[in-house]
């Protein structure tokens, strides 16, 4: 046997290695969950672009809205500041008008005192004109602003005219009344100009501008237009000119007649019987009287007195003007600290006017007793 034969026999009996023995064991694979199908790869950038564009549009819209809101607030502030400045002038001018009304209806005022008062009021009013001219108005209100100044100028010229009229040398009461009434009508005209040429157009402009929450001030200089008549001014001139020439009173009877006294919201008082009055927190009285003379009277003072120790309760009201044959009222409100549960007297007096001779019908006393509410 040859050496080759030996090798062949050896190979025949030797078992070949299996395939499994030659390959190492591999780990077992786990199945991953399937994802839902997404958009095609070319659509994703487009969606992102659309989102960015939408966000940019939203930012632009919000920015425009914010700018518009800021502009609207700035415009409102401009109008509000202007109206605030006008309101201060309007209120001060109204106070000048109230002082004028008090001066010309004051029963015991003299001519020299009245002229000095009118001169001071005219100077105050001119200062208000100067202040108004220094206000910076919004452009759309330029015309209305000029009319507001015009109204104030009417008031200045009217006061100056009244001052000159009362200080004049005329001795004719009728002529003086006509002259003074012409000047007083300037004051009435100032209120008309303020309302018709300033306030109403300014309110309309605010509506057109869609500005809300800004108030246009009112200003009423003349408290009683009846005082601007020739008859009323003639009466005032005669009253203040006593002893300086002219006639102190017009011909005919003068005076007033007390008609009634009532508790506000209650009954009329009796002069002959005890009047039981519940003293509520808003206790008040209404006095009615009549001009029983033949002439117009001005500055009629009515006094209500409740007797009380140690000092009586005294209230006064002034009625600017009364015409012959007409009734007028003086109202007294918020009467407090009355004497409770004891009899006392309530007295009403209407002051004497120049030329009045009969004083028996312009005063009266009423027996009263005040009780607590619910008592």
Image (cartoon, rainbow, N blue to C red):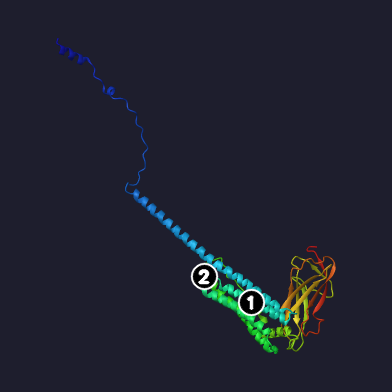
Please provide percent x and percent y for residue 277. Answer: 80, 68
Choose top left, top right, bottom left or bottom right for residue 26: top left
User: Is residue 38 left or right of 19 when viewed as pictured?
Assistant: right
Along the viewing direction, whichever of 46 and 161 lies nearer the viewer: 161
- What number is the disc on residue 238? none
Please provide percent x and percent y for residue 268. Answer: 78, 74
Please provide percent x and percent y for residue 96. Answer: 65, 75
Quadrant containing the C terminus in the rendered view: bottom right
**What residue lies at 61% left-to-right and 70% top-to-bottom?**
88
Q: Which residue is mark 2?
A: 138
Q: What distance separates the C-alpha of mark 1 from that of mark 2?
A: 28 Å
Q: Is residue 222 visible?
A: no
- Dot 1 or dot 2, earlier in sequence: 1
| SS under mark 2 | loop
Q: Is residue 77 visible?
A: yes
User: Is residue 53 left or right of 369 when viewed as pictured?
Assistant: left
Q: How many marks?
A: 2
- For disc 2, the neighbor class at 10 Å (few under 14, some 14 to 19, many from 20) is few
**What residue lies at 63% left-to-right and 84% top-to-bottom?**
182
Along the viewing direction, whichever of 124 and 6 lies nearer the viewer: 124
**What residue lies at 45% left-to-right and 58% top-to-bottom?**
63
Q: Which residue is mark 1?
A: 123
């Amino acid at each position: 046997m040859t050496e080759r034969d030996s090798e062949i026999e050896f190979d025949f009996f030797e078992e070949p290695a299996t395939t499994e023995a030659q390959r190492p064991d591999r780990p077992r694979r786990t199945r991953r969950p399937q994802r839902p199908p997404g958009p095609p790869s070319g659509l994703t950038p487009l969606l992102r672009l659309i989102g960015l564009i939408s966000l940019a549009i939203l930012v632009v819209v919000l920015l425009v809205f914010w700018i518009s809101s800021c502009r609207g607030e700035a415009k409102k502030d401009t109008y509000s500041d202007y109206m605030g400045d006008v309101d201060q002038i309007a209120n001060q001018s109204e106070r000048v008008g109230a002082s004028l009304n008090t001066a010309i209806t004051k029963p015991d005022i003299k001519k020299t005192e009245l002229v000095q008062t009118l001169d001071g009021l005219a100077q105050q009013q001119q200062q208000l004109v100067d202040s108004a001219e220094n206000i910076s108005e919004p452009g759309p209100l330029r015309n209305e602003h000029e009319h507001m100044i015009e109204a104030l100028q009417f008031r200045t010229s009217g006061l100056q005219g009244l001052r000159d009229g009362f200080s004049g040398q005329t001795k004719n009461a009728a002529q003086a009344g006509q002259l003074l009434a012409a000047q007083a009508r300037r004051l009435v005209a100032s209120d008309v100009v303020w309302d018709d040429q300033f306030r109403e157009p300014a309110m309309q402009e605010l509506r057109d501008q869609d500005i809300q929450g800004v108030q246009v001030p009112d200003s009423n200089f003349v408290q009683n237009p009846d005082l601007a008549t020739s008859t009323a001014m003639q009466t005032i001139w005669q009253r203040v000119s006593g002893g300086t020439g002219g006639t102190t009173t017009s011909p005919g009877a003068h005076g007033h007649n007390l008609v009634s006294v009532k508790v506000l919201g209650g009954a009329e008082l009796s002069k002959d019987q005890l009047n039981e009055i519940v003293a509520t927190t808003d206790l008040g009285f209404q006095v009615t009287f009549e001009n029983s003379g033949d002439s117009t009277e001005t500055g009629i003072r009515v006094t209500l007195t409740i007797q009380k120790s140690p000092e009586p309760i005294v209230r006064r009201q002034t009625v600017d003007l009364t015409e012959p044959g007409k009734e007028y009222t003086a109202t007294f409100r918020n009467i407090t600290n009355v004497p409770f549960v004891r009899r006392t007297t309530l007295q009403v007096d209407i002051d004497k006017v120049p030329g009045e001779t009969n004083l028996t019908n312009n005063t009266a006393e009423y027996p009263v007793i005040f009780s607590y509410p619910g008592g």
